[in-house]
Image: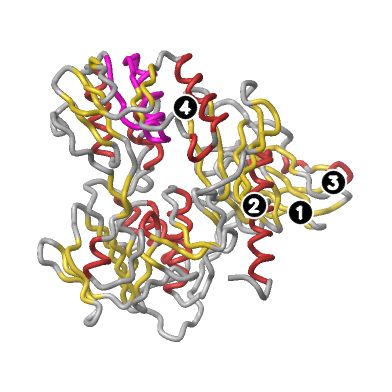
């Protein structure tokens, strides 16, 4: 942990900085008292905001200026230079913002500014009540955004989870590895929901939606009327029908309770078998190795993550894990589990006192199907995230939306996408008519290796690698038919931000084209 008595880097911005030293587009790292800050010169104006991203503390001074915002280089949160507001997930909290004055050829940072209070713009029919089904990334982000946008009506958040909304990506990473304490995991305290008049109900499953009378009914028989409804039911792990698949040492990872149970089992285990060689499986493998548990990974594919990142990256990732002691069994599947081992179709029998199954998830669309909403490998939504039934929106892992860049409907199972869709859906519930055109983003961390990915390429030609994977410093471009669809970066954070902006501009150009879908 950092020493709170250590002063932030850079000059004291309250004492003045010569304007001649601030070039256009520059971000000067400094401090305001004991608070780290950046002084920014952008299009002739001066701004001062906090320098640490409120998501994971990323260094905004190393980020990218886009219009009158700055984007975090780590996980692509976006903040207003004018107000410090967190404009885009994954950051939910603002950074500090100070007044800047110019006098005698210098810029002086003055008093801290308060965040402006928003009042909802007039809408043709402002909903009197909003119900959100699902307390994950999308549902929580939507509830927060409704209040941030000034919505004052009744707001109910129904979550099947027993825990308040939490940082799901961390469950397979630092929290499972034992390097992140549980107090870091909740996104908000219970008091936050009370203060913002969000009626958060935990451990509640919705069994039916009556679209005619506009109400939802829980499995327990409670009824909640709505004027607008957001479905954010997320996804459920694919469960393998294996002999022994229900034994007590067999785990799936989706919820905080799952991660707690898995971590507890790991503390008493010597060898684990991880079934599944994609992101969740490999992050779990890395976290278990951090706990000195021996790990075998079983996957039906010839190399890990090839379908998403290509053969060369897949080979690199396999080698990375092998260097940390992981043993792979690829091109095969499990046939059974007993108390001491996992049997494979290849004939191998792997000793194991812990088994983790991570072979993907399925969108939780049963509720939407029963309500008669259009469903096609997810809940079908339009560009405003509205379903086939007016007044009902969908966001997160269940939503399949029209993507301008690919010209196809896509569904993406990423935390940041879900949060941003929740935010967009909230604004559209209030009548904003805002298209969801955000470029998908995700990241993975395995040992000391990190990769960030922007865009979406379900199918692609041979990936183009600029730089060296073995040096852990490269950019990987994914195209199909000559069109750039996605970019992955390793230790090139700024390049990842620039790629995001490039893809955003490509989407805008397609939107402006008469031939755009």
Q: CA distance from mark 2 to mark 4?
A: 31 Å
Q: CA distance from mark 1 to mark 4?
A: 39 Å
Q: Residues within 10 Å of mark 3 (few under 14, many from 20)?
A: few
Residue 207 drawn at (x, y percent): 17, 63
Q: Is residue 274 magenta?
A: yes
Q: Is residue 221 magenta?
A: no
Position of 397 with respect to 71 (left or right) is: left
The residue that label 1 is drawn on is 46
**Magenta segment:** 271-296
Residue at position x 36%, y 39% from top? 185
Front of the two marks 4 and 3: 4
Q: Foreground: 94 or 342?
A: 342
Q: Residues within 10 Å of mark 4 (few under 14, many from 20)?
A: many
Q: Residues within 10 Å of mark 2 (few under 14, many from 20)?
A: few
Nearer-N-terminus badge (2/4): 4
Front of the two marks 2 and 3: 2
The residue that label 2 is drawn on is 481
Query: Does the residue at mark 2 contact the one at mark 1 (Cβ under 8 Å)?
Result: no
* Residue 361 at least partly seen: yes
Nearer-N-terminus badge (2/1): 1
Q: CA distance from mark 4 to mark 3?
A: 38 Å
Q: Which mark is residue 23?
A: 3
Q: Residue furthest bottom?
A: 124
Q: Which mark is residue 446?
A: 4
Q: CA distance from mark 2 to mark 1?
A: 43 Å
Q: Foreground: 356 or 8?
A: 356
Res 133 quadrant in image: bottom left
Nearer-N-terminus badge (3/1): 3
Q: Foreground: 509 or 269?
A: 509
């Amino acid at each position: 942990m950092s020493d709170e008595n250590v002063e932030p880097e850079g000059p004291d911005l309250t004492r003045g900085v010569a304007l001649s030293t601030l070039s256009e587009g520059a971000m000067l790292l400094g401090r305001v008292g004991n608070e780290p800050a950046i002084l920014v010169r952008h299009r002739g104006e001066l701004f001062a905001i906090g320098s640490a991203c409120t998501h994971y503390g990323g260094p905004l001074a190393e980020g990218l200026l886009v219009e009158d915002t700055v984007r975090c280089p780590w996980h692509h949160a976006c903040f207003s230079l004018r107000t410090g507001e967190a404009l885009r997930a994954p950051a939910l909290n603002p950074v500090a913002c100070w007044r800047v004055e110019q006098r005698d050829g210098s810029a002086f940072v003055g008093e801290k500014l308060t965040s402006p209070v928003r009042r909802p713009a007039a809408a043709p029919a402002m909903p009197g009540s909003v119900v959100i089904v699902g307390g994950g990334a999308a549902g929580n982000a939507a509830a927060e955004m409704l209040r941030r946008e000034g919505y004052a009506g009744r707001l109910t958040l129904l979550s099947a989870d027993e825990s308040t909304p939490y940082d799901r990506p961390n469950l397979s990473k630092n929290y499972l590895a034992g390097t992140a304490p549980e107090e870091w995991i909740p996104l908000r305290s219970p008091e936050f929901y009370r203060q913002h008049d969000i009626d958060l109900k935990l451990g509640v499953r919705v069994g039916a939606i009556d679209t005619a009378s506009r109400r939802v009914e829980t499995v327990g028989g409670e009824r909640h009327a709505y004027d607008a409804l957001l479905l954010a039911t997320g996804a459920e792990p694919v469960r393998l029908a294996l002999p022994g698949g229900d034994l007590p040492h067999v785990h799936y990872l989706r919820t905080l309770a799952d991660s707690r149970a898995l971590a507890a089992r790991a503390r008493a285990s010597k060898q684990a078998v991880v079934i599944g060689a994609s992101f969740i499986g490999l992050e779990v493998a890395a976290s278990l190795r951090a706990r000195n548990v021996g790990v075998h990974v079983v996957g039906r594919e010839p190399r890990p993550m090839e379908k998403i990142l290509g053969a060369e990256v897949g080979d690199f990732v396999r080698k990375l894990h092998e260097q940390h002691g992981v043993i792979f069994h690829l091109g095969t599947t499990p046939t059974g589990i007993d108390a001491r081992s996992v049997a494979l179709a290849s004939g191998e029998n792997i000793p194991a006192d812990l088994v983790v199954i991570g072979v993907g998830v399925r969108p939780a669309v049963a509720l939407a199907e029963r309500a008669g909403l259009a469903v096609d490998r997810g809940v079908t939504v339009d560009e405003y995230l509205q379903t086939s039934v007016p007044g009902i929106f969908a966001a997160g892992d269940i939503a399949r939306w029209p993507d301008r860049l690919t010209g196809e409907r896509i569904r993406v199972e990423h935390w940041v996408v879900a949060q941003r869709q929740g935010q967009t859906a909230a604004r559209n519930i209030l009548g904003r008519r805002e298209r969801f055109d955000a470029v998908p983003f995700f990241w993975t961390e395995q040992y000391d290796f990190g990769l960030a990915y922007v865009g979406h390429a379900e199918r692609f030609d041979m990936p183009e690698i600029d730089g060296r994977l073995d040096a852990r410093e490269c950019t990987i471009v994914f195209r199909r038919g000559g069109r750039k669809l996605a970019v992955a970066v390793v230790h090139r954070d700024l390049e990842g931000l620039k790629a995001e902006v490039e893809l955003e501009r490509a989407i805008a150009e397609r939107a402006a084209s008469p031939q755009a879908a």
